[in-house]
Image (cartoon, helix red, strand yellow):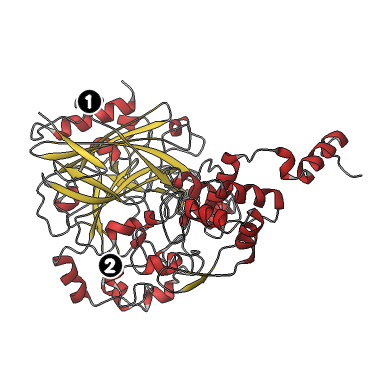
Amino acid sequence: MTKRTMILAMSMLAFGSAMAADPATINWAKIPAKKIQLFYPGQSSYEWLRSDAHKGAAKETARGDSCTSCHDASDEEVLQGRKILKGGHPLEPTAIAGKKNGNVDLHVQAAYDKKNAYLRFQWKTQNPYAGTEHQYLRFDGKEWKVWGYPKLDKVVQEGKQPGIYEDRMSIMIDDGKVAGFAKQGCWLTCHDGQRDMPKQFTKEEVAANPLLTAIKKGDVRKYLPDSRTDPSDWKTGKSVEEIAKLKAEGKFVDLIQWRAHRSYPVGMADDGYVLEFRLADAGKDMFGGNADSKTHQPKFMWDEKKVGFKSIRADSQARKGDLFLVREQNAVPFDPNADWKEGDMIPDYIVSREDAKGSAADNNAIANWNAGMWTVVIVRPLGLTNADDKMLKEGGVYNVGFATHDDNITTRGHFVSYVKTLGIGARTKADIKAVKLP
Amino acid sequence: MIRRLYSPGLVIILAAAVSMPLTATAQVDAAAAEKIFKENDCHKCHHETKAKKGPSLKKISAKYKEKKLDEKEAIKHMTSGKKVKLDDGTEEDHKIIDTKDVNVQTSVAKWMLSH
């Protein structure tokens, strides 16, 4: 049994009998697949789209026209992605080594039963391997420091660090309550000032920002226009009370992310939302940092008795397989007195299904990478009533945006879709129609 | 020492291809012209048959036929960046095509007017 098959089997055990359908045994061949084109957006922020640089479309975008009212060619995503990635395009200032194409074909299938929605995604990855590796803590002889960064980071661009980052499959969901999402989708959440975007925040700016300090955040991430008094300026956050009111009115988008390192090993996908920031749902995620905030040492290391090593090195053969540190499966508390040598490495994140709690632990997932392609099935319970979830229900039609990250990259280094609609047993038209399971 | 990248024969062929008037090629390469049209985002405003922000290619073509205009006028339009009047009464600078190659411009113009 390969490690990956084992993970699949363990995940299935974790799903248990409470689920109406086993996503691994659904006959997906009988469920129509919709090909959704994703493309590389570069730095096409909310602000850029409303600027004169978005030639002939600034006014139209500002008044709320849909992206596809202009971008409606049958090969639109191929066209836009290729242009942005070909080099010298103002929307992509960084030459990203290894990025082959500007677009990705994402095959989407959807099914549902009384308990869950099952969303199946397939796409060919940029690299000929599954991107299940994530950054490490590396002992430099004195201290444990992060080793491996996403490809867009300066340290990787300068060749000082290797590019290491997990693959991801993300979905944004709006139930019609977020103004503009049905027309402009994910682009509502992407702004100047964010990580790897133009005019990126400074630490001083963040430290001086009333909203970000109130919600205890140290950088700028996705946000919805409604959360700012000036939607084009991340610094103009509304008060915490005003934002709580927006949230209570459902004016946020759900963001589900399947993560090849931080959720895949425990058969889950994370559960978050975007309003004033990209936030995790209440409760506890299935992953957490493995570095002790005071000592900067790892909190856990591999259980040598179970996996044959307590750490790895950059040239370890083990790096060719899946390397997860799962608290309840293969981890033990870190031993600071072990004979650590320069170059020893331990994952920077610890993963646990048992520790995942509350609304953050709503979504299950199974996945498999084979012959260059990820197949991911996300299982989302219907009828969720948590304050930070969009409730999916039979008869509903939802505005959705899809994104894939692979090739050791994060932030803008993804492929995204124009907004689509997902119908769950709805009579009205939808781009993707979920099939009711018997 | 100058590195030779192309053989003299190839240079002659390429030069001939570049300088060859479009009329000599007889046919407009529709696929190539459409590709340039799309790469310049012309399709964002001009659909083949339906009105978008700008008139459809079908409408432009009909207007040119009626006024007995040809591709030279269309090239002027796509290279001068002059103001265009929109349906809502506002004016905007027309986008300038991102090529100075007259053959390519002519090819795109002919393809547009073939609708």
Disc marking residue A101 = none
Label 1: chain? Answer: A
Closest to the observer, B29 or A363: B29
| On screen, residue B16 above or below A208 | above
Q: Amino acid at mark 1?
A: Lys
Disc on the earlier residue, 2 or 1: 1
Q: Which residue bears the numbered disc 1? A: A30
| Quarter the C terminus of chain A occupies | top left
Closer to us: A264 or A350? A264
Q: Which mark is residue A276?
A: 2
Q: Characterize the local packing of mark 2: few (<14), some (14-19) or many (20 or more) Cα atoms within 10 angstroms.
A: many
Report the chain holding disc 2.
A
Q: Secondary structure at mark 1?
A: helix
Q: Residue furthest right?
A: B1
**Identity of the residue drawn at 50% across and 47% down:** A79
**Kind of residue sitting beneath label 2:** Glu
Q: Where residue A371 sits: x, y (%)?
A: 42, 26
Q: Marks 2 and 1, Cα distance to the nearest angstrom? A: 40 Å
Residue A437 in sight from this viewpoint: yes
Residue A91 in percent (x, y) is at 52, 59
- Left or right placement of residue B1 versus residue A304 in this view: right
Q: Picture coordinates of residue B103 (x, y %)? A: 70, 48
